[in-house]
Amino acid sequence: MNEPPRLPGGGFGVWSRDRLALARRGAEECGDVWQLEPGVYVTATAGPCEEVLHRAQDFPKPPSPLFPPLKRSSGAVPPEERAHAHAARMRGLRPQAVAARIGEIASGTARFADQWPTGQDVEVLPPVRHALAEIGVRYLFSEDAPTLLPFASQLFLAREVVVRPSRWVWPRWVPTPARRFRTRQQVAFTDALRSVVRRRRSSGHLGDDVLGQMLRPSSRYGLLPEEAVFDSLPGITVATFETPSRAAGWILLHLARYPRAAARVAAEAAVLPVDPAETTNAHFDGLRYTQALVREVLRLHPPSWLLTRRATRRTQLADYTIDAGSTVLVCPYTAQRDAREHSEPDRFQPERWLDDAGSPAKPGVFLSFGTGPHGCEGAALAMAVLTLLTAQTARRYDVSEPPGPEPSYRLTTFGGLTPVGLRLRATSRG
Ligand code: HEM
Protein backbone atom coordinates (compact mmCIF):
# COMPACT_ATOMS: atom_id res chain seq x y z
CA MET A 1 0.00 0.00 0.00
CA ASN A 2 1.36 3.40 -1.04
CA GLU A 3 0.53 5.85 1.76
CA PRO A 4 0.82 9.65 1.44
CA PRO A 5 4.10 10.89 2.96
CA ARG A 6 4.13 11.82 6.62
CA LEU A 7 5.39 15.34 7.37
CA PRO A 8 8.46 15.10 9.61
CA GLY A 9 7.87 17.03 12.82
CA GLY A 10 4.15 17.34 12.02
CA GLY A 11 1.29 15.74 13.95
CA PHE A 12 -1.64 17.11 15.95
CA GLY A 13 0.52 18.81 18.59
CA VAL A 14 2.23 21.08 16.05
CA TRP A 15 -1.01 21.37 14.04
CA SER A 16 -2.93 22.75 16.98
CA ARG A 17 -0.25 25.42 17.57
CA ASP A 18 -0.14 26.86 14.01
CA ARG A 19 -2.33 25.11 11.48
CA LEU A 20 -1.74 27.52 8.58
CA ALA A 21 2.04 27.30 8.89
CA LEU A 22 1.95 23.51 9.10
CA ALA A 23 -0.40 23.30 6.10
CA ARG A 24 2.07 25.38 4.09
CA ARG A 25 5.03 23.28 5.20
CA GLY A 26 3.13 20.07 4.37
CA ALA A 27 2.43 21.34 0.84
CA GLU A 28 6.03 22.47 0.32
CA GLU A 29 7.77 19.41 1.71
CA CYS A 30 5.36 16.59 0.83
CA GLY A 31 3.45 17.81 -2.25
CA ASP A 32 -0.09 16.95 -3.37
CA VAL A 33 -1.30 14.80 -0.47
CA TRP A 34 0.35 14.38 2.93
CA GLN A 35 -0.31 12.64 6.17
CA LEU A 36 -0.88 14.60 9.37
CA GLU A 37 -1.48 11.59 11.61
CA PRO A 38 -2.28 7.96 10.77
CA GLY A 39 -5.63 8.06 8.97
CA VAL A 40 -5.70 11.87 8.60
CA TYR A 41 -4.63 13.22 5.21
CA VAL A 42 -4.42 16.72 3.77
CA THR A 43 -4.93 17.43 0.06
CA ALA A 44 -2.74 20.44 -0.59
CA THR A 45 -2.94 21.15 -4.31
CA ALA A 46 -5.65 21.78 -6.90
CA GLY A 47 -5.93 18.31 -8.50
CA PRO A 48 -6.54 16.19 -5.40
CA CYS A 49 -8.62 18.92 -3.71
CA GLU A 50 -11.00 19.06 -6.68
CA GLU A 51 -11.02 15.27 -6.96
CA VAL A 52 -12.09 14.79 -3.34
CA LEU A 53 -14.80 17.44 -3.52
CA HIS A 54 -16.23 15.98 -6.74
CA ARG A 55 -16.12 12.33 -5.60
CA ALA A 56 -18.88 12.82 -3.04
CA GLN A 57 -19.77 9.10 -2.95
CA ASP A 58 -16.26 8.10 -1.88
CA PHE A 59 -15.61 11.21 0.22
CA PRO A 60 -18.98 12.37 1.61
CA LYS A 61 -19.30 15.58 3.58
CA PRO A 62 -19.97 14.79 7.26
CA PRO A 63 -23.37 16.08 8.45
CA SER A 64 -23.16 19.63 9.81
CA PRO A 65 -23.03 19.33 13.60
CA LEU A 66 -23.99 22.96 14.06
CA PHE A 67 -27.76 23.12 13.74
CA PRO A 68 -28.77 19.43 13.67
CA PRO A 69 -32.39 18.75 12.63
CA LEU A 70 -34.54 19.29 15.74
CA LYS A 71 -37.16 16.60 15.28
CA ARG A 72 -35.05 13.74 13.91
CA SER A 73 -33.21 12.01 16.70
CA SER A 74 -30.89 10.21 14.24
CA GLY A 75 -29.95 13.57 12.71
CA ALA A 76 -30.19 11.90 9.30
CA VAL A 77 -32.08 13.57 6.48
CA PRO A 78 -33.14 11.21 3.65
CA PRO A 79 -31.10 11.89 0.46
CA GLU A 80 -34.23 12.53 -1.65
CA GLU A 81 -35.40 15.20 0.80
CA ARG A 82 -31.94 16.77 0.89
CA ALA A 83 -31.92 17.04 -2.92
CA HIS A 84 -35.40 18.54 -2.88
CA ALA A 85 -34.50 21.13 -0.23
CA HIS A 86 -31.31 22.02 -2.11
CA ALA A 87 -33.23 22.51 -5.39
CA ALA A 88 -35.85 24.66 -3.63
CA ARG A 89 -33.22 26.90 -2.03
CA MET A 90 -31.30 27.25 -5.27
CA ARG A 91 -34.38 28.66 -7.02
CA GLY A 92 -33.92 31.65 -4.75
CA LEU A 93 -30.09 31.69 -4.63
CA ARG A 94 -29.01 31.03 -8.23
CA PRO A 95 -27.28 33.86 -10.11
CA GLN A 96 -30.45 34.96 -12.01
CA ALA A 97 -32.39 35.23 -8.73
CA VAL A 98 -29.60 37.32 -7.16
CA ALA A 99 -29.43 39.49 -10.29
CA ALA A 100 -33.16 40.22 -10.00
CA ARG A 101 -32.59 41.74 -6.54
CA ILE A 102 -29.34 43.62 -7.14
CA GLY A 103 -30.86 47.06 -6.34
CA GLU A 104 -32.05 45.84 -2.96
CA ILE A 105 -28.63 44.34 -2.17
CA ALA A 106 -26.93 47.59 -3.24
CA SER A 107 -29.20 49.57 -0.89
CA GLY A 108 -28.16 47.35 2.03
CA THR A 109 -24.43 47.64 1.33
CA ALA A 110 -24.75 51.43 0.81
CA ARG A 111 -26.36 51.71 4.26
CA PHE A 112 -23.24 50.11 5.75
CA ALA A 113 -20.93 52.53 3.91
CA ASP A 114 -23.08 55.57 4.84
CA GLN A 115 -23.08 54.66 8.51
CA TRP A 116 -19.35 54.09 8.90
CA PRO A 117 -18.24 56.81 11.37
CA THR A 118 -15.43 58.79 9.72
CA GLY A 119 -12.26 60.09 11.35
CA GLN A 120 -12.11 57.50 14.13
CA ASP A 121 -10.65 54.04 14.56
CA VAL A 122 -13.41 51.46 14.39
CA GLU A 123 -13.44 47.77 15.22
CA VAL A 124 -15.07 46.95 11.87
CA LEU A 125 -16.16 43.32 12.10
CA PRO A 126 -19.22 43.84 14.39
CA PRO A 127 -20.83 46.58 12.22
CA VAL A 128 -19.98 44.65 9.03
CA ARG A 129 -21.63 41.55 10.47
CA HIS A 130 -24.69 43.52 11.52
CA ALA A 131 -25.05 45.08 8.04
CA LEU A 132 -24.57 41.76 6.27
CA ALA A 133 -27.07 40.08 8.59
CA GLU A 134 -29.68 42.70 7.66
CA ILE A 135 -28.98 42.11 3.97
CA GLY A 136 -28.90 38.32 4.24
CA VAL A 137 -32.03 37.97 6.37
CA ARG A 138 -33.89 40.38 4.09
CA TYR A 139 -32.75 38.37 1.07
CA LEU A 140 -34.19 35.18 2.57
CA PHE A 141 -37.37 36.55 4.18
CA SER A 142 -38.16 39.97 2.58
CA GLU A 143 -40.76 41.87 4.60
CA ASP A 144 -40.60 39.30 7.42
CA ALA A 145 -36.92 40.12 7.98
CA PRO A 146 -37.50 42.53 10.91
CA THR A 147 -39.33 39.75 12.78
CA LEU A 148 -36.58 37.20 12.19
CA LEU A 149 -33.42 39.33 12.43
CA PRO A 150 -33.15 39.29 16.26
CA PHE A 151 -33.50 35.50 16.26
CA ALA A 152 -30.84 35.26 13.52
CA SER A 153 -28.42 37.29 15.65
CA GLN A 154 -28.99 34.89 18.54
CA LEU A 155 -28.32 31.94 16.21
CA PHE A 156 -25.00 33.54 15.33
CA LEU A 157 -24.12 33.89 19.02
CA ALA A 158 -25.05 30.26 19.61
CA ARG A 159 -22.82 29.24 16.74
CA GLU A 160 -19.89 31.21 18.13
CA VAL A 161 -20.27 29.59 21.53
CA VAL A 162 -20.45 26.09 20.09
CA VAL A 163 -17.50 26.42 17.70
CA ARG A 164 -15.14 28.15 20.16
CA PRO A 165 -12.02 25.98 20.02
CA SER A 166 -11.46 23.96 23.15
CA ARG A 167 -9.00 21.29 24.12
CA TRP A 168 -11.71 18.74 24.74
CA VAL A 169 -14.42 17.95 22.18
CA TRP A 170 -17.44 16.41 23.90
CA PRO A 171 -19.27 13.58 22.10
CA ARG A 172 -22.24 14.92 20.12
CA TRP A 173 -24.86 13.56 22.49
CA VAL A 174 -23.51 15.35 25.57
CA PRO A 175 -25.83 18.33 26.30
CA THR A 176 -23.11 20.85 27.21
CA PRO A 177 -24.34 24.34 28.28
CA ALA A 178 -23.25 25.70 24.87
CA ARG A 179 -25.30 23.05 23.06
CA ARG A 180 -28.34 23.67 25.24
CA PHE A 181 -28.05 27.38 24.45
CA ARG A 182 -27.82 26.56 20.74
CA THR A 183 -30.87 24.31 20.85
CA ARG A 184 -32.88 27.00 22.67
CA GLN A 185 -31.96 29.58 20.01
CA GLN A 186 -32.70 27.14 17.20
CA VAL A 187 -36.12 26.38 18.70
CA ALA A 188 -36.87 30.10 19.14
CA PHE A 189 -35.88 30.86 15.54
CA THR A 190 -37.93 27.92 14.25
CA ASP A 191 -41.01 28.97 16.25
CA ALA A 192 -40.80 32.51 14.84
CA LEU A 193 -40.34 31.11 11.34
CA ARG A 194 -43.30 28.74 11.81
CA SER A 195 -45.60 31.72 12.52
CA VAL A 196 -44.31 33.47 9.40
CA VAL A 197 -44.93 30.35 7.29
CA ARG A 198 -48.47 29.91 8.70
CA ARG A 199 -49.31 33.53 7.95
CA ARG A 200 -47.92 33.31 4.42
CA ARG A 201 -49.84 30.11 3.72
CA SER A 202 -53.13 31.41 5.11
CA SER A 203 -52.83 34.70 3.17
CA GLY A 204 -52.09 32.75 -0.04
CA HIS A 205 -49.08 35.02 -0.63
CA LEU A 206 -46.02 32.76 -0.35
CA GLY A 207 -43.55 35.47 -1.36
CA ASP A 208 -40.85 35.64 -4.05
CA ASP A 209 -37.91 35.34 -1.68
CA VAL A 210 -35.95 32.20 -0.75
CA LEU A 211 -38.55 31.17 1.84
CA GLY A 212 -41.31 31.64 -0.78
CA GLN A 213 -39.40 29.39 -3.21
CA MET A 214 -39.10 26.71 -0.53
CA LEU A 215 -42.86 26.80 0.16
CA ARG A 216 -43.84 26.34 -3.50
CA PRO A 217 -44.26 22.84 -4.91
CA SER A 218 -41.78 21.94 -7.65
CA SER A 219 -42.74 19.99 -10.78
CA ARG A 220 -40.06 17.39 -10.01
CA TYR A 221 -40.42 16.84 -6.26
CA GLY A 222 -43.82 18.27 -5.29
CA LEU A 223 -44.18 20.05 -1.95
CA LEU A 224 -41.15 20.14 0.36
CA PRO A 225 -42.08 18.77 3.82
CA GLU A 226 -42.39 21.69 6.22
CA GLU A 227 -39.87 20.16 8.66
CA ALA A 228 -37.28 20.28 5.87
CA VAL A 229 -37.86 24.03 5.56
CA PHE A 230 -37.40 24.49 9.31
CA ASP A 231 -34.38 22.17 9.44
CA SER A 232 -32.36 23.87 6.75
CA LEU A 233 -33.09 27.54 7.34
CA PRO A 234 -31.21 28.13 10.63
CA GLY A 235 -27.93 27.10 8.99
CA ILE A 236 -28.64 29.01 5.76
CA THR A 237 -29.64 32.12 7.69
CA VAL A 238 -26.33 32.26 9.57
CA ALA A 239 -24.46 31.37 6.33
CA THR A 240 -25.77 34.52 4.66
CA PHE A 241 -23.70 36.73 6.95
CA GLU A 242 -21.20 34.69 8.97
CA THR A 243 -18.67 33.69 6.28
CA PRO A 244 -19.31 36.84 4.18
CA SER A 245 -18.46 39.07 7.14
CA ARG A 246 -15.13 37.27 7.57
CA ALA A 247 -14.48 37.86 3.87
CA ALA A 248 -15.51 41.52 4.13
CA GLY A 249 -13.02 42.00 6.98
CA TRP A 250 -10.16 40.73 4.81
CA ILE A 251 -11.33 42.90 1.89
CA LEU A 252 -11.48 46.11 3.94
CA LEU A 253 -8.00 45.36 5.28
CA HIS A 254 -6.73 45.08 1.69
CA LEU A 255 -8.38 48.39 0.75
CA ALA A 256 -6.36 49.94 3.58
CA ARG A 257 -3.09 48.22 2.63
CA TYR A 258 -3.30 48.77 -1.13
CA PRO A 259 -4.41 52.39 -1.71
CA ARG A 260 -3.78 52.20 -5.47
CA ALA A 261 -6.09 49.23 -5.79
CA ALA A 262 -8.64 51.06 -3.61
CA ALA A 263 -8.40 54.13 -5.88
CA ARG A 264 -9.05 51.93 -8.92
CA VAL A 265 -12.14 50.50 -7.22
CA ALA A 266 -13.30 54.03 -6.35
CA ALA A 267 -12.89 55.15 -9.98
CA GLU A 268 -14.90 52.15 -11.19
CA ALA A 269 -17.59 52.77 -8.57
CA ALA A 270 -18.02 56.42 -9.60
CA VAL A 271 -20.62 55.39 -12.21
CA LEU A 272 -22.89 53.70 -9.65
CA PRO A 273 -26.22 55.55 -9.31
CA VAL A 274 -26.60 57.99 -6.40
CA ASP A 275 -29.74 56.13 -5.34
CA PRO A 276 -28.37 52.60 -4.74
CA ALA A 277 -31.82 51.08 -5.32
CA GLU A 278 -31.38 52.01 -8.99
CA THR A 279 -28.30 49.79 -9.33
CA THR A 280 -28.75 47.39 -12.24
CA ASN A 281 -26.91 44.31 -13.41
CA ALA A 282 -25.20 46.38 -16.06
CA HIS A 283 -23.74 48.50 -13.25
CA PHE A 284 -22.74 45.37 -11.38
CA ASP A 285 -21.12 43.78 -14.44
CA GLY A 286 -19.18 47.00 -14.97
CA LEU A 287 -17.44 46.53 -11.60
CA ARG A 288 -14.90 44.20 -13.17
CA TYR A 289 -11.85 45.28 -11.22
CA THR A 290 -13.80 45.29 -7.95
CA GLN A 291 -14.99 41.74 -8.61
CA ALA A 292 -11.40 40.74 -9.39
CA LEU A 293 -10.23 42.33 -6.14
CA VAL A 294 -12.86 40.43 -4.12
CA ARG A 295 -11.83 37.20 -5.80
CA GLU A 296 -8.15 37.88 -5.16
CA VAL A 297 -8.75 38.50 -1.45
CA LEU A 298 -10.81 35.29 -1.28
CA ARG A 299 -7.94 33.45 -3.01
CA LEU A 300 -5.35 34.63 -0.50
CA HIS A 301 -7.60 34.39 2.57
CA PRO A 302 -10.28 31.77 1.90
CA PRO A 303 -12.68 32.32 4.83
CA SER A 304 -13.29 28.53 4.77
CA TRP A 305 -9.68 27.46 4.44
CA LEU A 306 -10.09 23.76 5.29
CA LEU A 307 -12.96 21.41 4.34
CA THR A 308 -13.49 18.02 5.95
CA ARG A 309 -14.39 14.74 4.25
CA ARG A 310 -14.32 11.09 5.29
CA ALA A 311 -13.42 8.16 3.00
CA THR A 312 -16.25 5.59 2.85
CA ARG A 313 -14.08 2.89 1.29
CA ARG A 314 -10.47 2.04 0.58
CA THR A 315 -9.70 4.02 -2.55
CA GLN A 316 -7.05 5.68 -4.70
CA LEU A 317 -6.38 9.39 -4.45
CA ALA A 318 -3.67 10.88 -6.65
CA ASP A 319 -0.98 8.15 -6.49
CA TYR A 320 -1.94 6.99 -3.03
CA THR A 321 -4.17 4.49 -1.30
CA ILE A 322 -6.55 5.93 1.29
CA ASP A 323 -8.13 3.57 3.82
CA ALA A 324 -11.86 3.44 4.54
CA GLY A 325 -12.71 5.66 7.52
CA SER A 326 -9.80 8.06 6.96
CA THR A 327 -10.33 11.78 7.35
CA VAL A 328 -9.38 13.87 4.34
CA LEU A 329 -8.82 17.59 4.92
CA VAL A 330 -9.16 19.59 1.70
CA CYS A 331 -7.07 22.75 1.83
CA PRO A 332 -8.12 25.60 -0.50
CA TYR A 333 -5.61 27.81 1.33
CA THR A 334 -2.53 25.96 0.04
CA ALA A 335 -4.10 24.99 -3.31
CA GLN A 336 -4.67 28.69 -4.03
CA ARG A 337 -1.10 29.61 -3.10
CA ASP A 338 0.51 27.04 -5.38
CA ALA A 339 3.04 28.59 -7.79
CA ARG A 340 2.04 26.11 -10.50
CA GLU A 341 -1.48 27.58 -10.41
CA HIS A 342 -0.78 31.26 -9.79
CA SER A 343 2.35 33.25 -10.60
CA GLU A 344 3.82 34.93 -7.50
CA PRO A 345 1.12 33.21 -5.46
CA ASP A 346 1.60 35.18 -2.23
CA ARG A 347 1.31 38.53 -4.00
CA PHE A 348 -1.97 40.48 -3.92
CA GLN A 349 -2.67 41.08 -7.59
CA PRO A 350 -6.35 41.48 -8.54
CA GLU A 351 -5.36 41.92 -12.20
CA ARG A 352 -4.65 38.21 -12.42
CA TRP A 353 -8.42 37.64 -12.65
CA LEU A 354 -8.89 40.10 -15.54
CA ASP A 355 -8.32 39.40 -19.22
CA ASP A 356 -5.92 42.34 -19.46
CA ALA A 357 -2.68 41.97 -21.36
CA GLY A 358 -0.18 40.48 -18.97
CA SER A 359 -2.59 38.41 -16.93
CA PRO A 360 -2.54 34.65 -17.32
CA ALA A 361 -4.73 33.27 -20.13
CA LYS A 362 -6.20 30.63 -17.86
CA PRO A 363 -6.87 31.71 -14.28
CA GLY A 364 -5.69 29.19 -11.72
CA VAL A 365 -7.74 27.16 -9.31
CA PHE A 366 -10.32 28.94 -7.16
CA LEU A 367 -11.80 26.82 -4.40
CA SER A 368 -12.91 29.46 -1.91
CA PHE A 369 -16.54 28.50 -2.56
CA GLY A 370 -15.71 24.79 -2.72
CA THR A 371 -16.78 22.82 -5.79
CA GLY A 372 -18.78 19.71 -6.73
CA PRO A 373 -22.11 18.63 -5.24
CA HIS A 374 -21.51 20.51 -1.97
CA GLY A 375 -20.15 23.69 -3.53
CA CYS A 376 -21.39 26.91 -1.92
CA GLU A 377 -25.09 27.58 -2.52
CA GLY A 378 -24.67 31.27 -1.75
CA ALA A 379 -21.68 32.07 -4.01
CA ALA A 380 -23.63 34.41 -6.32
CA LEU A 381 -25.21 36.23 -3.38
CA ALA A 382 -21.86 36.52 -1.59
CA MET A 383 -20.11 37.89 -4.67
CA ALA A 384 -22.87 40.47 -5.20
CA VAL A 385 -22.85 41.61 -1.56
CA LEU A 386 -19.06 41.76 -1.24
CA THR A 387 -18.50 43.49 -4.58
CA LEU A 388 -21.08 46.20 -3.88
CA LEU A 389 -19.89 46.70 -0.30
CA THR A 390 -16.30 47.10 -1.57
CA ALA A 391 -17.27 49.49 -4.36
CA GLN A 392 -19.48 51.70 -2.22
CA THR A 393 -16.96 51.86 0.63
CA ALA A 394 -14.00 52.71 -1.62
CA ARG A 395 -16.08 55.28 -3.48
CA ARG A 396 -16.80 57.21 -0.28
CA TYR A 397 -13.67 56.69 1.82
CA ASP A 398 -9.95 56.25 2.02
CA VAL A 399 -9.59 53.36 4.43
CA SER A 400 -6.45 53.20 6.55
CA GLU A 401 -4.94 51.14 9.36
CA PRO A 402 -4.30 53.10 12.54
CA PRO A 403 -0.86 52.72 14.12
CA GLY A 404 -0.70 50.00 16.73
CA PRO A 405 -0.75 46.23 16.75
CA GLU A 406 -1.35 44.57 13.38
CA PRO A 407 -4.56 42.59 13.03
CA SER A 408 -3.99 38.87 13.31
CA TYR A 409 -6.19 35.94 12.40
CA ARG A 410 -8.13 33.23 14.17
CA LEU A 411 -8.85 29.73 12.90
CA THR A 412 -12.17 28.27 14.00
CA THR A 413 -12.87 24.59 14.51
CA PHE A 414 -14.79 24.28 11.25
CA GLY A 415 -12.03 25.58 9.01
CA GLY A 416 -12.83 29.27 9.39
CA LEU A 417 -10.16 31.91 8.78
CA THR A 418 -11.19 35.18 10.34
CA PRO A 419 -9.34 38.46 10.97
CA VAL A 420 -8.99 39.50 14.59
CA GLY A 421 -8.38 42.95 16.08
CA LEU A 422 -9.30 44.61 12.80
CA ARG A 423 -9.45 48.34 13.54
CA LEU A 424 -9.72 50.64 10.54
CA ARG A 425 -10.29 54.34 9.95
CA ALA A 426 -12.37 55.84 7.14
CA THR A 427 -11.66 59.34 5.82
CA SER A 428 -14.00 60.87 3.23
CA ARG A 429 -12.40 60.86 -0.22
CA GLY A 430 -11.57 64.39 -1.28
C1 HEM B 1 -17.64 34.80 1.07
C2 HEM B 1 -18.69 34.12 1.39
C3 HEM B 1 -18.76 32.63 1.38
C4 HEM B 1 -17.76 31.70 1.31
C5 HEM B 1 -16.27 31.93 1.20
C6 HEM B 1 -18.40 30.39 1.35
C7 HEM B 1 -17.70 29.20 1.27
C8 HEM B 1 -18.30 27.96 1.20
C9 HEM B 1 -17.60 26.71 1.00
C10 HEM B 1 -16.09 26.57 0.84
C11 HEM B 1 -18.51 25.73 0.99
C12 HEM B 1 -18.23 24.23 0.77
C13 HEM B 1 -18.10 23.51 2.07
C14 HEM B 1 -17.68 22.07 1.87
O1 HEM B 1 -17.57 21.61 0.73
O2 HEM B 1 -17.45 21.41 2.88
C15 HEM B 1 -19.80 26.32 1.21
C16 HEM B 1 -20.98 25.62 1.32
C17 HEM B 1 -22.19 26.22 1.54
N1 HEM B 1 -22.48 27.55 1.55
FE1 HEM B 1 -21.14 29.06 1.43
N2 HEM B 1 -19.75 30.55 1.46
C18 HEM B 1 -20.03 31.89 1.47
C19 HEM B 1 -21.26 32.48 1.52
C20 HEM B 1 -22.44 31.80 1.59
C21 HEM B 1 -23.75 32.43 1.60
C22 HEM B 1 -24.02 33.93 1.47
C23 HEM B 1 -24.66 31.44 1.73
C24 HEM B 1 -26.14 31.68 1.77
C25 HEM B 1 -27.05 30.96 1.38
C26 HEM B 1 -23.93 30.17 1.77
C27 HEM B 1 -24.50 28.92 1.88
C28 HEM B 1 -23.81 27.73 1.79
C29 HEM B 1 -24.44 26.42 1.93
C30 HEM B 1 -25.91 26.14 2.20
C31 HEM B 1 -23.42 25.46 1.77
C32 HEM B 1 -23.55 23.94 1.90
C33 HEM B 1 -23.72 23.28 0.57
C34 HEM B 1 -23.80 21.77 0.73
O3 HEM B 1 -23.32 21.21 1.72
O4 HEM B 1 -24.35 21.12 -0.16
N3 HEM B 1 -22.60 30.44 1.69
N4 HEM B 1 -19.65 27.69 1.31
Image (cartoon, rainbow, N blue to C red):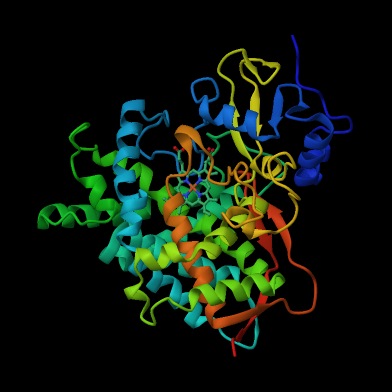
On the rendered structure, is 150 left or right of 408? Answer: left
Q: Nearest the camera: 389 or 70?
A: 389
Total number of numbered discs in the rendering: 0
Compared with 266, 386 (above or below) is: above
Q: Residue furthest front?
A: 357
- In front: 198, or 257? 257
100 or 374, which lies in front?
Answer: 100
Q: Quadrant of the C terminus?
A: bottom right
Residue 354 seen by the camera: yes
Query: Percent position (x, y) of residue 28?
Result: 82, 37
Does residue 185 appear in this view? no
| Residue 219 placement (x, y as % from top left) | 17, 35
- Residue extending farthest to the top is 1
Q: Residue at x 31, y 31 (%)?
A: 81
Counting from the top left corner in percent of width and height, residue 410 is at 70, 55
Residue 93 lies left or right of residue 49; in this view the side is left
Q: Quadrant of the N terminus?
A: top right
Residue positioned 23% across, 52% down in the render: 212
Residue at 75%, 46% (x, y): give it.
20
Q: Nearer the viewer, residue 115 or 265?
A: 265
Instruction: Please report the residue visible at 56 percent of the width from the left and 54 percent of the height from the top.
Output: 355
Extreme residue toward the bottom, this view: 430
